[in-house]
Amino acid sequence: MRNDFMCMVILILRVNHYCLTCSQNINDDKCKYIKLDVGERYVYTGTLVFSNLTTSEIIHLLETIDELAFEELFSHVQEHLISHSSEFIKQNISTVTDIAFKHEAFKILQTYCIDLITKEPQPFFSSPAFLSTNESILIAILSSDDVRIEEIILWNYIIQWGLHNSSTPIEMIIKDDEIEYETIDEYTSIDFTSLKTTLSPLLSLIRFSDISTEDYETKVKPFQSILPSNLLLWRYHFEDKTIKINLTSRKPPYSINSTLINHKQSTIIANWIDSNEGNLNVNGKIQFGKIRFNLLYRGSKHQFSFKKFHKMCDNQGPSLVLIKSKSNIDGCCKEEIIGGYNPVGWKSANQYIIRDDSFIFNLGDLSSESNYILSRIQPNLKYYAIYDGENFGPSFGKGDMEFSCISRPREGFCRWRCYDKPIRDTEARFWIEEIEVFKVIQ
């Protein structure tokens, strides 16, 4: 009885709070509907129905439940929005991110938006809305190690934002998304002081050590008067290479969570997958591409077995296999990094996969790129490109790279049959020291 009474008191208080809030400043018809219909239904019945709401209305609803302090709904509505309206969020990333950061309670949506921006930053930074972006959003972006954009381009956008938002209006000339740096000589000391104040919270988050000397000279040095003195950037670039910068470099293009290879090797593999990936830009630095590698399976972590391999890797789409092999040849221990690319992925289908774009490779001991071997499937033998068997490990060709002994899953061999060249100089069996399988996202 006491519990029923307390529930009634709480309900009355919430209804009164709801009615009071709804009576204030409701001019927008959509907001009226959301507050007076959806909100009323939830207050009296404890149910929330999304079926008749558009994505824009769900965003209004999210703002409303924050305003009405319906804390128990914060996570639920954000998760519904993300799972059912991801494309809308992507198409309207600036607007949705701005709304998310105006509400302290929208942590899930904030994290999701920042993750989207860091993975595909160009649409966000090049949009007309960027210059009006809230400072807290930029801090969240710059604090990430995963922003897939060159640091000098990021610096250029931050300077544009600072010039636009300075307390003293500063004229800037933009051409092809870049500041006309020749006009900077016309800026006054007042302009620079205003710009420094505006950008103060952001400058310490720029990874200046990722900027080339050439770019620093032409695009950073003109703004040297706004830089924090403790960074000692001039000395870092031109005098003393040992000076430490507090922030580590951002994750490089094609970064990979591997114990077997580094991002340089993963960049080469990305280029093997797609010749448009892993190329150099005009500054001699690797461009950020679209390919990403997500770890699915690691033998030492998840167990060396075909069953575990298929459990972790089946139905995941295109995959990259990396293997550290160990063998004894003529009394000498030899270790190599070998692997293969499956363009469609594993399904335990117990049949060959027909592909003309699969490949296997040998990175040797990683000491020199000249030792690397890339072997693509022979066109006339594409019917045997990959064997996808539930009692097999990740196998390619008719023995070109095979793991077929279920009782000895760490044993394999490479016998040249279907690919255009052998990847090992022996057909002897080898031992798997480590195996990693990555989902390839393009």
Image (tube, rainbow, N blue to C red):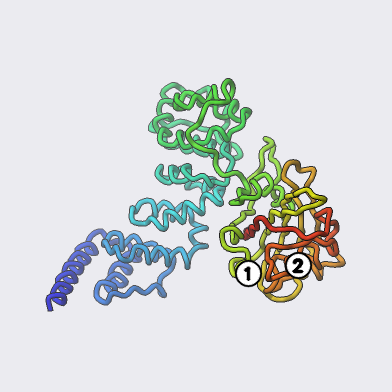
Q: Position of residue 62 (x, y in %)?
A: 35, 62
The label on residue 386 is: 2
Q: Nearer the viewer, residue 200 or 342?
A: 342
In this picture, is 206 found above or below 309?
Answer: above
Secondary element type, mark 1: helix
**Residue of label 1:** 310
Residue reaching furthest front?
Answer: 331
Residue 286 drawn at (x, y percent):
66, 42
- Mark 1, Cα crowd under 10 Å, few <14 / some 14-19 / many 20+, is many
- On the question of residue 137 being in view, the answer is yes
Q: What kind of element bears circle 2?
A: strand
Residue 431, image x and y in percent? Answer: 71, 58
Q: Residue at x 25, y 72 (%)?
A: 43
The correct choice, above or below, for 4 with respect to 339 in the image is below
**Quadrant holding the C terminus:** bottom right
Which amino acid does the dot numbered 2 rest on? Ile
258 displayed left or right of 18: right
**Horizontally, is 352 left or right of 219 in the view?**
right
* Residue drawn where x is 40% and y is 28% of the image: 194
Q: Quadrant of the N terminus?
A: bottom left
Q: Residue furthest right?
A: 380
Q: Is residue 298 left or right of residue 12?
A: right
Q: Residue at x 57, y 62 (%)?
A: 302
Q: Which mark is residue 440?
A: none
Who is closer to the viewer here, 387 or 307? 307
The percent coordinates of residue 265 (x first, y second) are 69, 47
Alpha carbon separation for disc pair 1 and 2:
15 Å
The three-letter code of the residue at mark 1 reads: His
Q: Nearer the viewer, mark 1 or mark 2?
A: 1
Give the answer, above or below, for where 74 lies relative to 160.
below
Which residue in the rendered view is the most extreme toward the bottom?
1
Which is nearer the N-term, disc 1 or disc 2? 1
